[in-house]
Amino acid sequence: MKLSEHFTLSEFTVSQTASRYGYDNTPGETEIASLRALALNVLEPVRTQFGVPITISSGYRSLKVNKKVGGSSSSQHIKGEAADIQVWGYDPVTVFNWIAFYSGLDFDQVIQEFGSWVHVSFTERRPNRRIALRARKSGGKTIYDRITEPLDMV
């Protein structure tokens, strides 16, 4: 099922965890509508800006998949409102900075995750918060720092 010009439902639902454990990772109609909104309002503009494909490493997660991967019980992934992405040929910091500070996009959260990928979310349930965060590990725990200006390239 095509959600937008460049994104299909299967890109958001493929899950090694679901396959490995035999979990159903099929979203309902509400979650599909949310995935479509995310694709149209955030991911398509990102793809247009960078002009290359985007890999979705984690999109929709069923409750079982989310629990198995250690996701938060309030994760926007279970609502179909979030995706972890990598933009082909671009450093995640560049992608994060563009979304958070230069794009003007209406996003809920953008998180630069451990220098490896970007988590981005969009919701239609309430006004988007435009929160920019950086995730890092400290003492075995994930710490989220609020980011108020573009990150330096490593």
Image (tube, rainbow, N blue to C red):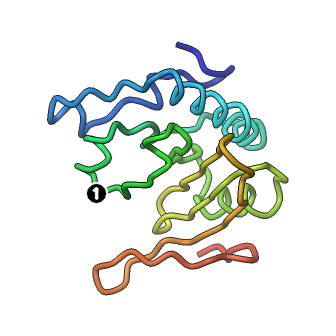
Q: What residue is at 46 percent from the left and 68 percent from the top? A: 114
Q: Which residue is mark 1?
A: 70
- Outermost residue, left direction? 21
Q: Quadrant of residue 97?
A: bottom right
Q: What residue is at 55 percent from the left and 56 percent from the top? A: 118
Q: Position of residue 34 (x, y in %)?
A: 59, 33
- Most foreground residue, 7 or 26: 26
Q: Is residue 37 left or right of residue 77?
A: right
Q: Position of residue 59 (x, y in %)?
A: 46, 39
Q: Quadrant of residue 125?
A: top right
Q: What residue is at 58 percent from the left and 59 percent from the top? A: 92
Q: Is residue 116 left or right of residue 40?
A: left
- Outermost residue, bottom direction? 139
Q: Quadrant of residue 47?
A: top right
Q: Position of residue 138 (x, y in %)?
A: 37, 84
Q: Position of residue 137 (x, y in %)?
A: 38, 78
For the C terminus, which image quadrant?
bottom right
Q: What residue is at 70 percent from the left and 48 percent from the top? A: 126
Above or below — where is 143 with respect to 84?
A: below
Within 10 angstroms of label 1, few (less than 14), some, or many (20 or more) residues?
few
Q: Is residue 48 left or right of residue 92?
A: right
Q: Callout 1: helix, strand or loop?
A: loop
Residue type at tag 1: Gly
- Outermost residue, front direction? 126
